[in-house]
Image (cartoon, helix red, strand yellow):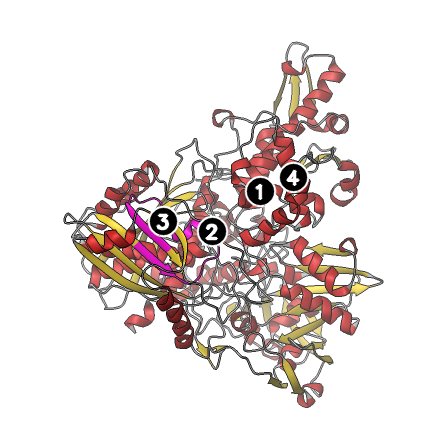
Amino acid sequence: MASFILNGETVTVDADPAMPILWVVREKLGLNGTKFGCGIAQCGACTVHLDGQPVRSCSTSVSQAEGREITTIEGVSGEDGALTAIQQAWVSEQVPQCGYCQSGQIMSATALLRDNPAPSDDDIDEAMKGNICRCGTYTRIRRAIKVASGQIEPRAEGEVA
Amino acid sequence: MNDLTPGEKGTKKERSGLSKWTRRGFIGAGVLAGGGLLIGIGVRPGNPIDRLAPKVAGGAGEQLINSWVKIDADNIVTAIVPHCEMGQGAHSVLGQMLADELDADWNLVRVMQAPADGSYVVNDTARMFVAPFTMNAADWIEPTWNGLFTQIARMADVMITGGSSSIRTTGQHSMRIAGAAARKMLVGAAADAWGVPASEIVTRDSMLSHEASGRSATFAEFASAAAEQPMDQTPVLKTADQYRLMGRSMARTDIPAKINGTAEFGIDAMPEGLDLSYAATIRPPVPGTSALRMDASRAREMPGVLQILNMGNFVAVVADSYWQANQAVNAIDIEWSQSDSPVKTMEDQYAVFADALDAAGADGGEEAAARGNAGEALANAASTIEAEYRVPYLAHAPMEPINCTAHYADGKCDIWTSTQVPLMARSEVAGILGLDAEDVTIHHPYLGGAFGRRLGSEYVGMAARVAQATGYPVKLIWSREEDTQKALYRNADTCRMRAGLAENGGLQAYDSVFTQRHDPAEACVPAMYSIPNTSVRVAEAPLHLPFQAWRSVDHSVQGFFIESFIDEAAHAAGADSVEYRLSLLGDSPRHKAVLEKVAEISGWREPAAEGRAKGVAIVESFGTIVAEVVEVDMSDGTPKLANVWAVCDAGYVMNPDGFRNQIEGGIVFGLTAAMYGELELRDGAIVQSNFHDYKMLRMNEVPEIEVALINSGDVPVGGAGEPGLPPAAPAFANAVFAATGRRLRTLPIAKQFA
């Protein structure tokens, strides 16, 4: 049995203590927003927050989360589904292509902006280089982080550019 | 006046049971099999909405108008699109094109994935590959061509997304027509009801109105009556000055679900009422071998393990969770059969290529294109240059690992998977299970990237076999290692090139010979350049690894060969890389304009910053001309990517921001391969296994990218997904040459500076 707080709610789940958080939330708890990409903490697609810190859930066992708080992409938005500034910027800058890596990207960016409200390019590189985007949306991710942190203006809604 | 046309490619034998389909070859087979018989059968039969409605318009109050569009009681227009959404944005833009012709209010438009059904074959995609000359047929013959290619596409299961083709084929020739036809049906219904001439009815923002009588109605009010109206197969389409949505950067409809974790990909399948088990598999390390014996005693004792299967060409463990299945399958000792391939290392593969190239010599091999007399012109040239180029094998590495969920029970099979070829996957499963295709249902949600990888559907067949063998509904997932090492690949190749220069440096002769030719046929031909004597030859040689189209296919290889070697010619002529190309583009005004523009926005003619240098390349692929300038920073002795400027002429861009996003992605994909992409072989097996050794460019390594678009109009619309890629590698390598004087004739680049 493993017990932790998932997106604000206490959950208890019957799982091997060595099972990575990724597979516990996906297969046992049915939250599919966290993605499997590489299984060895190389791509960042599985990024979640453990007590607020971004971790690679494919390589973090559920026993390490015992009694702690896990936040997944499903727990990022406000209670009524209201988008965060980062999510809004992901829309205004039309960031995603296939979208598969974007849960992880948003989790990494969310942690960055919470600790550093106006990150420089170097700060963004450092915080985001663990997240691969095979579609190559990096330049838009960078712009969206700057939009979300108020450093540049978002593009118009509806019709962009 | 370019008279250089690529020769027809001969029918190629399958090199591997896995590489079942090349974009040209497979569809071509359909034509040969049925073309003669089908001419005249004709028209896409009537308006099949009665049959389709239960599949696509089951909601309350929904009225299907034709195959591609439905309208509900709340006046929501839904475009039903046959192509998959793998990040290229086709769902949105196809919806935009249909909605524009329909005069729908974009805020009331939704897009849905068409089911894997014969009615949703992409006949125009098939048609573009097989018979592009029919694409703009006169009205009187159009129904015949349309029907013919629909029949062919159905026979060949052509429900394909690839070839940067969705917008320029299905968009231009199906979605727009469906939208315009539906509009005409709505107008016809309103005209009948109101007793006014159809010509006096105006459509706008999902409303119909008749000014003289003051009448107006929503589309929804006439949706049912419209479905009874005759459907015009060749309605008049809008001209560019009449567009309301096309040509504008409408926000993508799929993005909201992709920022909050709700977007569903194949790997997320959780079919209601099914208690899924999970399968992990191991495939042979060397292609073509199989599992002879295995010792699964350790795996059998591991927690959660339900079944262990030796399926011959793969071994599977089915367990309560994927994590358990994957640990267990890796605990099995498997004895594989021996491969008879002579290739154990990449040096062996390059030796195979060299043998074929040696045999072809200076004028042998299959002629791909010829003009003038290259041999003679080379012999008489004032000076000649020659070089040998190489590229390695590459994996596609989409972020969503390969996966498929299968449920086989009571003579029916349901499949949930990410695929570019849902109907081919359906046929594959039907064949394996001995079912009729209609008894197999393919559910195909969003794809977590594909880049050609998911044109193969071997994993779908694997899941069907495991479901059949175990009786469990099963979700089968390949590990990243399996997809890196045991999949389908961009081919390696070697190319030998020669050029003959006149006294003034002008390019008089060009000869290239290489061993691999797939698609598109014209990729190997430097057709935009005015070179009086040209010879392009193929000396076929076998590949050790199975081939699969990889983003931009042959252009990813030939773009590097051609545009690097043209750069060598410029250098030999003592000319500037842009000016030299411009001098060769006299007969290609669109290319010239693109190159001029990229020189302008990149500051090409201004002095380089300290430690930096620029390289240029231009490639036309999939109907779009793209020139790129890459700026590298060599100040610490290793190449860093500083800036990329790209200029594209696609004729007309339907969604500029979406197009730019695709070009940006193509550039990063191309630069990633150029910087790091390489698969090495040891004992015939791939060495690289995951992202630590099959490296991707990351946030701290990508350049700034600026993309400018030219709408030159009056030409068929070009593609977006692939054309950004081919110029990236040569422009990068040419920049390194400009900075260092080192000509890079092999990829990847990073390790040459390690």
Mark 1 vs mark 3: same chain? yes
Please say if the residues under marks 2 and 4 sit with CB atoms less than 8 Å apart.
Answer: no
Residue reaching furthest to the right: B410
Query: Which label number is shown at residue B148?
Result: 4
First along the sequence among labels 1 and 3: 1
Q: Residues within 10 Å of mark 4 (few under 14, many from 20)?
A: many
Q: Nearer the viewer, residue A44 or B612?
A: B612
Which one is in front in this view, the residue at disc 3 or the one at disc 4? Answer: 3
How much space separates mark 2 and mark 3, taking CA atoms?
Answer: 17 Å
Determine the chain carrying the residue at label 4: B
Q: Secondary structure at mark 4?
A: helix
| Kind of residue sitting beneath label 4 | Leu
Q: Quadrant of residue B260?
A: bottom right
Residue B401 seen by the camera = yes
Q: Position of residue B212 (x, y in %)?
A: 65, 9
Name above or below for residue B352 compared with residue B413. below
Name above or below for residue B569 compared with residue B35. below
First along the sequence among labels 2 and 4: 4
Q: Residues within 10 Å of mark 1 (few under 14, many from 20)?
A: many
Q: Which segment is the magenta one?
A: B511-536
Q: Position of residue B600 (x, y in %)?
A: 26, 42
The residue shown at (67%, 16%) is B198
Residue at which label 1 appears: B127
Determine the chain carrying the residue at label 1: B
| Kind of residue sitting beneath label 1 | Arg
How much space separates mark 1 and mark 2, taking CA atoms?
Answer: 14 Å
Name above or below for residue B264 compared with residue B356. above
First along the sequence among labels 1 and 2: 1
